[in-house]
């Protein structure tokens, strides 16, 4: 039997999720059987899987040791290097806005490969804002993600409340992201189409009408900001947020992104597409949300590879 006292970062977490984090090697069927057999207790009493944990709760797990997570030192590696690599756009006690360059993954299953979330965790560990040994189930997490080949702003949450509240902001469309892209054709206006994803090829197709039950509507707003030498710097605003939406929608409109090997115009000198998530705007956030202080705030990258490349054309 192992027991854990819930911290503030466990407050509001579903009991089943808490246990899954602690026992990653345990099959879900066995975990839920443990709930039924009273092998998981809160404050000495049986609780259902959907029970919401409160700070200070004593959680007792009568589960074999081999199912519990084994601690590793993956965040101990080169924390100072990770810290110096991070380009922080904004930071407070709850969240961070970080610039992710082209080529860097947001997440990775390969612990030898640099990725943004590990860099954030290492940075917060270095600052002692995150101490893994004191947490039961929470680790700092990214609230949004962008493609490996896309640069731009990514949001990270430092605590569970901030993670839950930022996810609510995103879910309720109280956050707006704007992108910069370089194309070979000027595009202006609000466009609607349909996107279908091929799970095998991991590529999407855009059509003027749905082509099956899996087709999803997409709405994107484009504004050509500058034009020079037959190249165009376009601001892209997402109304819907689908996989590869901007890249595929522009290609559908005959304005594929420069450097985009999958959908746009491949250029030998470019490793990735000229696309950057350069601006984030927050709408009016309800008072009940702990991140209400971000209401009406705007965050913009001071510089980006996309902007620099266009300026040199």
Image (cartoon, rainbow, N blue to C red):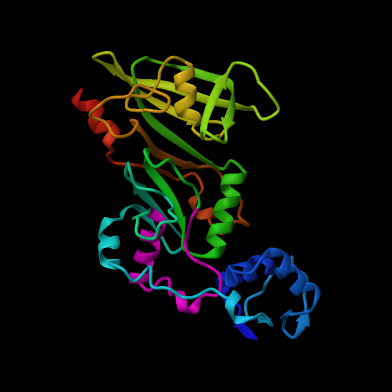
Q: Report if residue 51 is visible in the image.
A: no
Position of residue 64 relative to residue 77, above or below, is below
Q: Quadrant of the N terminus?
A: bottom right
The residue shown at (54%, 53%) is 166
Determine if residue 239 is in view.
yes
Q: Nearer the viewer, residue 235 or 39?
A: 39
* Span highlighted in magenta in the image: 116-142
Residue farthest toward the right in the current orientation of the protein: 36
x and y, in percent, of residue 271 in the image: 29, 34
Q: Position of residue 95 (x, y in %)?
A: 45, 58
Residue furthest left in the image = 312
Please identify the quarter of the rendering in which residue 292 is found: bottom right
Q: Is residue 174 magenta?
A: no
Marks counted in the figure total 0
- Horizontal side of 114 relative to 164 (left or right) equals left
Work out whether residue 313 or residue 73 is closer to the camera in this orientation and state it: 73
Drawn side of residue 211 relative to residue 99, left or right: right
Horizontal side of residue 41 vs 231, given as left or right? right
161 or 45: nearer the viewer: 45
Name the residue: 56% across, 25% down: 219
Would residue 305 appear left or right of 94 to someone viewing this image? left
Q: Residue at x 36, y 65 (%)?
A: 122
- Indicate the quadrant containing the C terminus: top left, top right, bottom left or bottom right: top left
Q: Position of residue 220 (x, y in %)?
A: 52, 25
Is residue 134 in the magenta section? yes
């Amino acid at each position: 039997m192992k027991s854990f006292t819930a911290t503030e970062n466990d407050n509001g977490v579903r009991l089943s999720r808490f246990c899954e984090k602690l026992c990653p090697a345990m099959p879900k069927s066995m975990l839920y059987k443990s709930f039924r057999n009273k092998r998981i207790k809160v404050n000495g009493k049986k609780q259902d899987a959907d029970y919401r944990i409160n700070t200070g709760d004593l959680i007792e797990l009568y589960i074999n040791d081999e199912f519990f997570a084994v601690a590793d030192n993956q965040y101990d590696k080169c924390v100072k290097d990770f810290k110096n690599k991070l380009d922080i756009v904004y930071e407070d006690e709850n969240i961070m806005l970080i610039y992710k360059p082209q080529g860097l993954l947001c997440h990775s299953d390969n612990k030898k490969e640099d990725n943004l979330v590990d860099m954030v965790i290492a940075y917060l560990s270095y600052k002692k804002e995150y101490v893994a040994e004191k947490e039961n189930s929470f680790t700092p997490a990214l609230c949004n993600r962008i493609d490996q080949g896309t640069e731009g702003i990514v949001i990270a949450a430092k605590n569970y409340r901030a993670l839950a509240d930022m996810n609510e902001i995103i879910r309720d469309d109280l956050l707006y992201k704007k992108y910069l892209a370089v194309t070979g054709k000027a595009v202006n206006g609000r466009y609607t189409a349909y996107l279908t994803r091929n799970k095998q090829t991991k590529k999407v197709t855009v059509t003027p009408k749905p082509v099956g039950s899996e087709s999803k509507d997409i709405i994107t707003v484009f504004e050509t900001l500058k034009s020079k030498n037959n190249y165009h710097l376009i601001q892209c605003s997402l109304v819907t947020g689908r996989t590869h939406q901007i890249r595929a929608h522009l290609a559908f409109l005959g304005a594929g992104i420069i450097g985009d090997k999958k959908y746009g115009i491949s250029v030998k000198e470019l490793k990735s597409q000229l696309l950057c998530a350069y601006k984030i705007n927050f709408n009016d956030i309800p008072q009940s949300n702990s991140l209400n202080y971000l209401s009406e705030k705007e965050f913009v990258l001071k510089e980006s590879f996309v902007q620099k490349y266009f300026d040199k054309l």
